[in-house]
Image: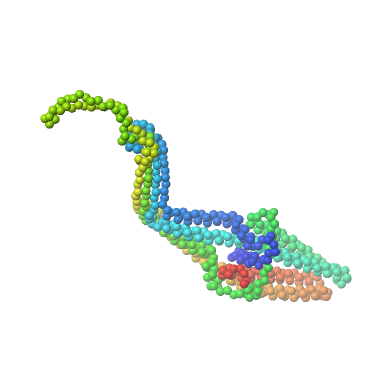
Amino acid sequence: MRQVYLLLLACFLSAGISAQSSSPWTLEKAVTHAISNNLQVKRLDNFTEIARLNLQQARNGRLPTASGSTNVGAQLGRTIDPTTNAFEQQTIGFQGYQLNAGVTLFNGGLIKNNLAQAEVDLAAAEMDARVTSNNIGLQVANSYLTIVLLKEQLNNSRAQLQLTTEQLNNTDALIRAGALPPAQRFDLQAQQAANQQIIVDLENQLEMATLGLQILLEIDFAEEFTVATPELNPTEAQLFENYNLNEVYTAARNTQPTVLAAELRKESAQLGIEVAKAGLRPTVSLFGSLSTNFSTVSKDFSDPDLTNVMVVQGPAVPVLLNGEPATLSTQTTTGSPAFPKIGYFDQLNRNFGQSVGMSLNVPIYSQGRNQLNVQRAKVQQLNAELDIEQADNQLRNDVQLALTNLRGAQQSYRAAEASREAAQAAYDNAQRSYRAGSANSLDLVTATNRLDQAKTEFTRSKYQLIFNRQVIRFYLGQGFTLN
């Protein structure tokens, strides 16, 4: 919750920056750079891209499938000629071509529910990307805001050092004039040294915080890097505006990516049940194929070559056929006919075949896997419902805490304002008394320290109040301006 405060206030601070040059880094520039270059964000972008590819794959599930293949080889010994199905005692070279296609007509709603689930998963992944980007923004805002506050503290400490130095110079002048004893300068001298030490410590802290932000942004350390300083002047009405719990919660419920992502996961889990149930239903599909083949021993038996075949007529033998005299003679042949081989493309054309059909696959028993998948999907749905409830409860708690913190910050601001005014009055009185000689340097240093502490606390409470107010405005979806 505190990180949310830091991010929101820092975003508001960046909106109030009056940039005098293009060199200082605003929060908006830093967050944009971090989101574009951070490795965690890039990794999550890859997950989102995977979800997008899964969606495309689910869409492609409605399309038919087609595949082609060819085989080539040699058969040795007594083998079957693939073109005649006759046994041949020789080496046969062969090659075949196949083209198969199929399309699913019905598979229990698997394709439809897979597609719907992939769409929801992509939306959830995009919501997760928003959450991760916000987390990166929180880290950047935390570092950015630390630098801004350290710069303000450093400016205040330098102003305090200048004031102490002026007081010491005035005291030295009075000592030289004989109006004050020399011992009056010791307290101011010690205060000056303390101010210088504070400045050195703040400068070191600022350098380390700047280095940390550069590491987070993954930029070159040698590159010139400065953070812009904002100016805030909210009105009393803006700082003390009241908000209604139900109004803030209802608005936040519709805008926060964590809750929306949980709701999308629940929807995906519900679709997962239907996906699992598809395993219990039959599948109907159409299929078709084209095929042809070639053999090195294939011959054309319809066109024999009789060149080497000779017919020999035997002697006539008298016979009676149906009481009538006649003669019969025998014929013998010598040689054997030759059959020409069929060419490659002619074989592919003659052996070309087609098939088409429909298949029905009915699940009967699969070792209980389908039933277990359905039960597992129902448990995942229950977990998704619990995730929504948990995210919703966390959001309500965050809103309630934000409103409580806002009221506490308003009271703290009022108390700090009164303390600052009292410390200012005490300091003015100590300054007058010191100049009149009725107060010593220790009294002046004490009053100065109290005023410095009161101013620091007032500034802190003012920023804290702005934090809490901007958190509420963030939940309401009203942006980060005070208009």
Figure quadrant of residue 349: top left
Q: Measured from the top left, where is residue 410 in percent x and y? A: 63, 73
| Residue 431, placed above or below residue 140 | below
Q: Nearest the camera: 119 or 263?
A: 119
Q: Is residue 324 visible?
A: yes
Q: Nearest the camera: 2 or 296?
A: 296
Figure quadrant of residue 21: bottom right
| Residue 174, placed above or below residue 352 | below
Kindly identify the residue that appears in the image at 80 percent across and 75 percent down. Answer: 432
Image-based side of 255 in relation to 289, left or right: right
Indicate the colouring scheme: rainbow
Q: Measured from the top left, where is residue 60 in percent x and y? A: 45, 54
Q: Measured from the top left, where is residue 267 in percent x and y? A: 46, 62
Q: Residue lying furthest top in this view?
A: 315
Kindly identify the residue that appears in the image at 57 percent across and 55 percent down. Answer: 42
Image-based side of 377 in relation to 351, left or right: right
Q: Quadrant of the N terminus?
A: bottom right
Kindly identify the residue that appears in the image at 50 percent across and 58 percent down. Answer: 122
Q: How many marks?
A: 0
Q: Quadrant of the C terminus?
A: bottom right
| Residue 140, placed above or below residue 92 | below
Image-based side of 338 in relation to 196, left or right: left
Kindly identify the residue that appears in the image at 58 percent across and 70 percent down. Answer: 478
Q: Is residue 380 visible?
A: no
Figure quadrant of residue 99: top left
Q: Measured from the top left, where is residue 310 in percent x and y? A: 28, 26
